[in-house]
Image (cartoon, rainbow, N blue to C red):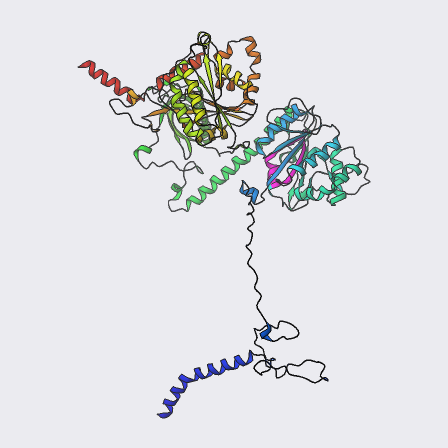
Amino acid sequence: MRFSAFASVLRSVCPVVIGISLGFTLSLLSVNWTEEACYEGDNGGKVVGTPGQDGQLKGARKPNSILTNSDAEPEEDFEPRIVPYKQVQQNAPKKVFRAKYISTELGMRERLFVGVLTSKNTINTLGVAVNRTISHHLDIVIFFTGMRNRKVPHGMFVVSHGDERLIWNMYQNIKYILDHYINEYDWFYFVQDDTYTEADRIKSLADHLSMKRELYMGSPEEFIGGEMEGKYCYGGFGYILSRTLLLRLQPFLENCRNDILSARPDEWLGRCIIDYTNTNCVSGYEGLRYNHFMLGKNSDPSKEQSEHLKQALTVHPVSDPEQMYRLHRYFTEIELQKTYDEIAKLQAEIKNVSVVAFEGNRSAQWPIGINPPFEPKSRFEVLRWEYFTEEEIYSCIDGSPKCELSGIDRMDVADVIDAAMGELNKKYKPVLHLKKQQLINGYRRFDPTRGMEYTLDLQLEVVNQKGHSRSITKRVYLVRPLSRIEIIPMPYVTEGTRVHIIIPLTLQDRSYVNHFLEVFASNAFETSENAVLTFLFIYDPVEAQQVNHNDIFASVKTQINAYERKYPTVKIPWISVKTETPSQIKFMDIISKKHPVDTLFFLANANTNINSEFLNRCRMNSINNWQVFFPIHFQDYKPEVAYHNQQLPVTTDLVKDAGHFDRRAFEEACFYNSDYMSTRTRMVADVQDNEEIIETLDVFDMFVKYSVLHIFRAVEPALHQKFVYQACNPRLSEDIYHRCVQSNLEGLGSRSQLAMLLFEQEQGNST
């Protein structure tokens, strides 16, 4: 009993004793003990101990103590040194540069650069044909030539070196790429303008090549005379150079120009690459082949049955543009058939998989591979079907119950019927042959998730193999699916461009100026918007004679002076014009001469409310030498009609009962002065034959008829106009006058609002 009690006490005390012993042992081990601090001195070689202040040996030091010098000065002689405080001077923080695009900051590059070697004699023939067949498939295509041509074909990026020597041009081509594009692309493809290139295949080849390889790829050829080892790439079939190879070649490019003599530019480049990079031309790499085909003289590609031609990336030589276009059609048909075969294969796979699905074949949507139909969540989302026959359609733009089927709608119906008959005969041949007798009923609707859907009730004549015929009715369903969205490359624009706003004013427009200036001042003057406002005062001959003593625009000029005094940094210029027939082209002829060619104009009227949001869209949608912008403003309905027997609201919202987007109005326009001048130049011949054409056209019609630019029309909610009745000029063309009249009529009110007014009028007359 006593032993067990003693054992329990020992168990509880034992850890404490062990811990104290262990701690004491570790503390002794952490001290560096020495009995004597020894050094050799002048005391006859005796070992002398140096006592400390307390009589203990200084040999035993604390581990963290610091020996200040080799003479082991006493610790009491140490005095701390006071360092005076000096304020640290803050340097200006270094500004961090951030790239505008993520790809720039991360060093991402495009895959393929394409350079086409052309000349002043072939750039307008074969060069144009090459550009039309490959440029819309590739990111960039640049044409390199020697002598400068006075007229460069539209839509082509041409670099002229000013010399027709072939070797010099090739040297300048490589140098130009190294100076401007070496950090933007991984692969560089060179080809002559008498060579057809299957753009999608060459782009696919570059996508599968490793960018870090020093690769020189094309059609290998022996050097002339055979005196040099290695092979160069024959320029007729084109060749691909890697960015890594060009960077390695860059320091020696000047040596190549001075040391290597050759008659052919492709051979000169091959010798340069082999001499300084030890890289030979290869026709294949890592299982990828550079396939090419030698085309015979006067050869017709549609009659060629060679498998080498079908698999070729490039075809050479091409004798004329017509042969280039035939080759393009030939390869396009091959790729289109491959696409159809792939679609059929995928559809078969979907059918096979759907068999084992939970719902069986019902789980596969029709048509196979197309998005399922849109399912409305409420009655307001139900898609409307349009009824049509071969002659008429029962949903008209003007709201009429029935109108003639014409234009693109007629072509659409005819195309759908032909497609239906083709599919029916494909399905029932050779047992039956079907002929269309008439379309009984036709229905169509646009489904935004999949495309245009059609339901056709066709009356058909069916003829069997024995020649017996019979008339039957067959219902067919068709879908015209939405094609893949294509992103069109657009030139780069910025929102920093200054906009010159032109406001033409007539006698009738004076009442709108006060409100216009008030709104514009708050949106532009007070925010320092990068825009210049210019007024164009239009006088008729009688008003112009009285301008000295009775200026009809005197009040407007007074308002302009008041705003210039209120905003000292703002200047509002004005231009006075005398004319009997106001015409946009006449006005712009005067304004265009007073501004530089790179000026961005916004042509508007005094009833338009302009803000910064729209001005930014004007800058982004107007692209020099590419696109002009004609916005569609929102116009209020006539207040007496829209708010009949109601209190007028303080502000108008953009809702269907308050107004509409006036698609008949073309007064507002954004365009560059250079585009206006080039388009106006194309009118010279017609103006000489008929001077009145300037008065019968507006700026929109001029760009449509005489320019090669894109005409961009879009609704613009940031442009807002109050209701105003326009004075239509009968001297203008019939189309412009009709648009003006229709704009006035449609701007009165919505159909329901006008119907209510008529209903109330009829009720009043009946009582």
In the rendered view, tell whether residue 355 sits above or below residue 596.
below
Can see residue 723?
A: yes
In this rendered view, identify the residue nearer to me: 149 or 698: 698
Q: Is residue 470 above or below residue 306?
A: above
**Which of the 4 quarters of the picture holds residue 119?**
top right
Q: Answer yes or no: is residue 679 visible.
A: no
Q: Is residue 252 left or right of residue 497?
A: right
Whole-percent x, y for residue 232 in the image: 74, 39
| Residue 448: % across, % down | 40, 33
Between 503 and 106, the one lying in front of the other is: 503
- The answer to which image quadrant residue 706 occupies is top right
- Number of numbered discs present? 0
Magenta region includes residue 190: yes
**Which of the image's four quarters has the N terminus?**
bottom left
- Quadrant of the rendering where the C terminus is positioned: top left
Q: Is residue 534 above or below residue 200?
A: above
Instruction: Point out residue 314 in the picture as x, y percentages from the top left corner.
Output: 65, 34
User: For this rendering, which residue is in front, 226 or 622?
Assistant: 622
The extreme bottom residue here reads: 2
Q: Hey, which quadrant is residue 677 in on the image?
A: top right
Residue 155 rendering spot, x and y as whole percentages = 59, 26
Residue 325 vs residue 265: left or right? left
Frontmost residue, 409 versus 121: 121
Q: For the magenta stretch, what is the residue range?
A: 185-206
The answer to whether residue 163 is magenta is no
Left or right of 513 on screen, residue 497: right
